[in-house]
Image (cartoon, helix red, strand yellow):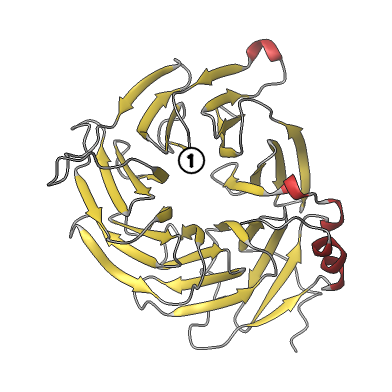
Amino acid sequence: MTNLSKKPQDFNIFVAGKTGAFKGIKVEENAAVVKNLQNVEILKPDSEISILNWGDNNETEILIGTVNQIVKIYDIDFKAYSTSMEAKFGTGSIVGLTRINGSITTCSKSGHIKIWKCKKTEELELITEGNVSKMKKCPNRDGIIGLGGEKNDLKLWDVNKKCKVFCAKNVKKDSLELEIPIWVTDLTFLPNNENLVAVSTRHGHIRLYDTKAQRRPVVNITVENQSFNAISLCNNNNQVVVGSTTGHLMVADFREKKVVHRYKGPIGSIRDVYAHSELPYFASVGLDRYLRIHHLETRRLLHEQYLKVRLNCVLMTSAYGKNSDINEDQNIECVDLESDNEYNELFSNMESFT
């Protein structure tokens, strides 16, 4: 077995799970290091991590949000937590977590958004309408956020002005004159055009909106009998990778207006996907406890690692794949730096999640 425990742990993948576990993974040519970055002995049933996000463009910190509305900040350089705070506002899990104007900004499932500051008099609060499944910030416009949820179509808000700047309109009724159900599960802004936003839905839709052109989607791709949980923009900016509740991974092309690739591997619900911004790779995690990394173009499953806990979130660093750490023809050996024994007592008393 390759001894990696003495090598620098420059993790290129981070995952988080339903137990509150937070792990760093370093994938190399012929092995992978897995390390717990959260002390599992202090985890409680409500420690589940609901969202991970980069805190800055340089990927020096990771923002971590939980179902009980706790926010932690993990410092990549120091390999330690720099902040842990209660972010109680509204009800439900934290479904959106970012920085706006340098300040931590959260969104709860109930649609309550808050910009947290050192001085309470400077804090900004915004209450939106309806249930929210996901909130994300526009990378090109610091004060603009997008959100959506069950019976709550895509909306863009300017949080600095506390006003709504875009509200999507549902697609036309079906052939039986029935309304198409709305349930936005995830969204992503296209960096090459700040007006373009892509969303996935629980009812099998992959949609692209041009917020300056019209309220209805300019592209609407429907995949029968699928229910999407997650979406991520691919490296060519014309395609998105989506993951479904039934374990299906696929890539949709907005120019061709159809699904162009499907991927094998997952056997459980996909909870999150993350595509590399420059290279043809993407990572996915889900309830089957596996991290998987696929090649977008060849559709090959490059890496597959069992990580013991049901997984909700994944991040891939921009450095992944750039330093010859990927060997597409070689099997990956996993080296876990944590003993399995530390999980035994935890899981024996842990409440089961569905």
* Percent position of residue 120, x then y: 70, 14
* Percent position of residue 279, x then y: 42, 65
Q: Quadrant of residue 14?
A: bottom right
Q: Say whether residue 313 is left or right of residue 252.
A: right
Category of crowding for the residue at label 1, using alpha-carbon neighbours closer than 10 angstroms: few (below 14), some (14–19), many (at least 20): many
Q: Is residue 233 above or below residue 4?
A: above
Q: Quick one: SS at disc 1?
A: loop
Count all numbered tags in the image, as a single digit: 1
Q: Residue at x 16, y 39 (%)?
A: 172
Q: Quadrant of residue 82?
A: top right
Judge by depth and name the residue closer to the eye, 269 or 351.
351
Q: Is residue 68 above or below residue 156?
A: below
Q: Is residue 108 above or below residue 9?
A: above
The residue indicated by pointer 1 is 133
Q: Residue at x 70, y 61 (%)?
A: 23
Q: Say whether residue 62 is left or right of residue 176.
A: right
Q: Quadrant of the N terminus?
A: bottom right
Q: Say whether residue 43 is left or right of residue 324.
A: right
Q: Quadrant of the C terminus?
A: bottom right
Q: Is residue 8 above or below residue 221?
A: below
Q: Residue at x 23, y 54 (%)?
A: 221
Q: Residue at x 64, y 62 (%)?
A: 310
Task: Give the residue at the far left of this rendering.
Answer: 175
Q: Say whether residue 184 is left or right of residue 221.
A: right
Judge by depth and name the residue closer to the eye, 57 or 221.
221
Task: Give the residue at the far top of this rendering.
Answer: 121
Task: Give the residue at the far front of this rendering.
Answer: 176
Q: Amino acid at mark 1?
A: Ser
* Percent position of residue 144, x then y: 42, 28
